[in-house]
Amino acid sequence: MRRKIQFSLLSFGLFLFAINTFAEQTSIQGNAFFYRGKMIEIRQYLDLFTFKSLLLEKMEIQPDGSFKFQFNADETGLYLLKIGRINTHLFIEPGNEYTLVFDEPEGEERYDLAKDIFVMPDIFEAKGKLNTHITEIEKSINQFLIDNSKYYGRGVSQEIIPKADSLVILLNELYADSKSEYLRTHLHFRLATLELQTNHGRQKVYDKYFKEHEPAYAHLSFSTAFELLFQEYFTYLNPSAEHRFQATADSAIKTANYQLLYSCMKADPFLEKRTFRELLIASELYELGAEQKADLKNVLALLDSLIMNAQDDACRLIAANAEQLLTRFSPGALAADFEFADALGNTYRMFEYKGRYVYIQFFDKFTAETLKEMSLMKILKEGYGADIAMFSISTTEPPSRLKYFTDKYDFNWIFGTAQSSEAILSNYDLRSLPTYFYLDKDLRFIKVPSPPPGSRIEKLFAKSWNEEHPNKPLLFKLQPPEVTDDPILPHDN
């Protein structure tokens, strides 16, 4: 049932983009010389709570660093440009023309392949100044918070309130005559976040910015302010003492009882609107599932119920997006296939190893710490190698380096270099390296993230052994070797 609902709702979401008869051709061009030869994508967010996005166009950056997109944009909003894990945001108005210049990356932007990096290229707009104005608003607010940092300690001093009120008045006056409804709405909810950050009471902020306003789903400023107003709501429930319903909500989540969860939230005076209750359930359930603060099966069951019961189409779409993202790496989900070159330069695909349990180590470069973990993998290989195929896949090391280290340390499992490191980093959502995955014989996830080499992963290996060899005692138990010195790394040429 869940898969069918997801497909229909996501199709509905995509259909909304397609039927808008007011779509206008929009142009984005620019230069990203450092990234020449890499793929650049332009994506539109499906919602600004889960940040699931739809690919609109992609192309290879030319040898001179240039790129150009022309596509039909149907609504003003926040769009995403991606070069691997390098990201930048752009506010796009249909029919406008934009020029972006990406500077050469510095620091972690250059070296940390496993981390999302958000950069701020120079942006030139042919018509209007939406990006310029939003950037100016951000600069004013950020500078205000820096200049008044002395009011922040264990709490926030009330002395900052009149200063913040003055800034709110100033910004409202500066943009009062703006012809852009999008900009005015953006500023409205951006100021809500500012007041929450400067010790203005939640009741005051709710009455001023939310009570008489409908959800502005196309605005990042709305989603940010909404999430801050109801921060970690299901973890630390906010209503005052006479309205508290912590025990009821906990019970509803543990039993996947949607009606109980929805009805008990009515006690909160900030949730008098049905839409706000539905939106809060969708966004908070996604956070609970992503941070593993609640049983995933219960979270998914509650999201299913929300999809069937919600009156607001946007909330239903957010819930469907949340389900799809949460189940991407859940036990039983199919791992993404990928191509790699072994130490001799021969190329293979991971799906060629279907039929065996698989343990994958993704790593960047050979380091002393990585080699220590590989020394434990070597012991696991000796004990379980007949039943479990093991891989160490690098995102950067060439085959010659793979051969050097496998020969030097007598590593006798499969080493490879990913043919597309960008695809690996994206498809497996690699946020740090090394990272490990344990797959069943159909190459479906058993546990994500999987433990590194050691006693915890051996318990999973032993379980697989017992399933394959019932009533046959284990002949092997992992005993980590004593490592007295760091492995010696050769100097790079």
Image (cartoon, grey):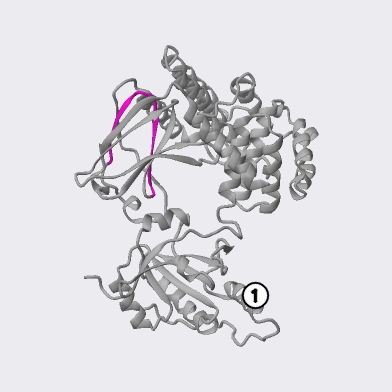
Q: Is residue 163 among the parts visible in the rendering?
A: no
Q: Residue at x 22, y 43 (%)?
A: 65
Q: In the image, which residues are magenta? A: 85-102
Q: Nearer the viewer, residue 186 or 190?
A: 186
Q: Is residue 274 left or right of residue 409?
A: right
User: Residue 473: percent from the left, percent from the top?
Assistant: 67, 86
Main SS, magenta residues:
strand
Q: Is residue 69 left or right of residue 428?
A: left
- Quadrant in the rendering for residue 245: top right
User: Residue 374: percent from the left, percent from the top?
Assistant: 44, 75
Is residue 101 part of the magenta span, yes or no?
yes
- Quadrant in the rendering for residue 306: top right
Does residue 447 lie above or below 368 as drawn?
A: above
Q: Nearer the viewer, residue 87 or 472?
A: 472
Q: Residue at x 66, y 30 (%)?
A: 276
Does residue 305 lie above or below 91 as drawn?
A: below
Q: As drawn, which residue projects farthest toward the top?
A: 177
User: Residue 116: percent from the left, percent from the top?
Assistant: 42, 49
Q: Residue at x 55, y 61 (%)?
A: 449
Q: As drawn, which residue projects farthest toward the left?
A: 64
Is residue 197 part of the magenta span, yes or no?
no
Dot 1 corresponds to which residue?
463
* SS label for mark 1: helix
User: Residue 242: percent from the left, percent from the top?
Assistant: 80, 33
